[in-house]
Image: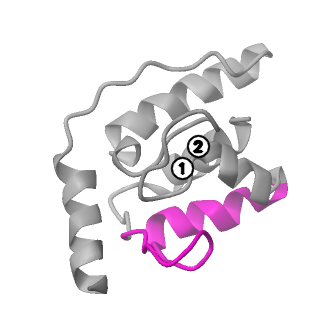
Amino acid sequence: MRILSTLLAAALVTGASLALTAPAHASAKGNAHASAKGAALFTKNGCVACHGLGAKDPKKMGPNFSEVAKKYSKKDVAKLAKKIRAGGKGSFGQMPMPPMPQVSEADAKALAEYALSIK
């Protein structure tokens, strides 16, 4: 069952047709650029297939980014970036997150910062 769940998640991540616009969550100019980059990476890398953004978004396979922001702080960016690239399970339930090794370390960091900016 775990293998099937992982394969399904991977198929959704790699094969989903994606469309998303950058939300206006950032207030400072520097944060606006980071949020725009994070939003673009969220779409480009297929995160939208398994993750929503805010608390009002419907629950998907993975946690909404607002849930991630509640659980982790800005000091956890490197930890989250590592989880994005390595995958894992257990932090938000038993549904595994497939590894995303194609995401560069810099992009994983930007995605982690973006996740932590969503309230």
Q: Classify residue 16 by image quadrant.
A: top left
Mark 1 closeness class: few <14, some 14–19, many ≥20 residues within 10 Å: few
Question: Compared to 4, does 27 lie above or below?
Answer: above
- Image position, residue 93 (x, y; %): 56, 74
- Taking the spot 36% from the left edge, 66% from the top edge, the residue there is 101
What residue is shown with label 2?
110
- Image position, residue 65 (x, y; %): 60, 45
- Image position, residue 55 (x, y; %): 64, 38
- Image position, residue 11 (x, y; %): 19, 59
Quick check: marks 2 and 1 in contact, CB under 8 Å?
Answer: yes
Mark 2 closeness class: few <14, some 14–19, many ≥20 residues within 10 Å: many
Q: From the image, which quarter does the C terminus lie in?
A: top right
What residue is shown with label 1?
106
In the foreground, 47 or 92: 92
Question: Compared to 56, does 107 lie above or below?
Answer: below
Numbered disc 2: secondary structure: helix
In the foreground, 30 or 95: 95
- Amino acid found under the numbered disc labelled 1: Ala
Q: From the image, which quarter does the N terminus lie in?
A: bottom left
Question: Compared to 116, does 96 lie above or below?
Answer: below
As drawn, the label of residue 12 is: none
Q: Classify residue 72 by image quadrant.
A: bottom right
- Amino acid found under the numbered disc labelled 2: Ala
**How far is disc 2 from disc 1 in space, using C-alphas?**
6 Å
Q: Is residue 76 left or right of residue 9?
A: right
Which segment did they paint magenta? 75-98
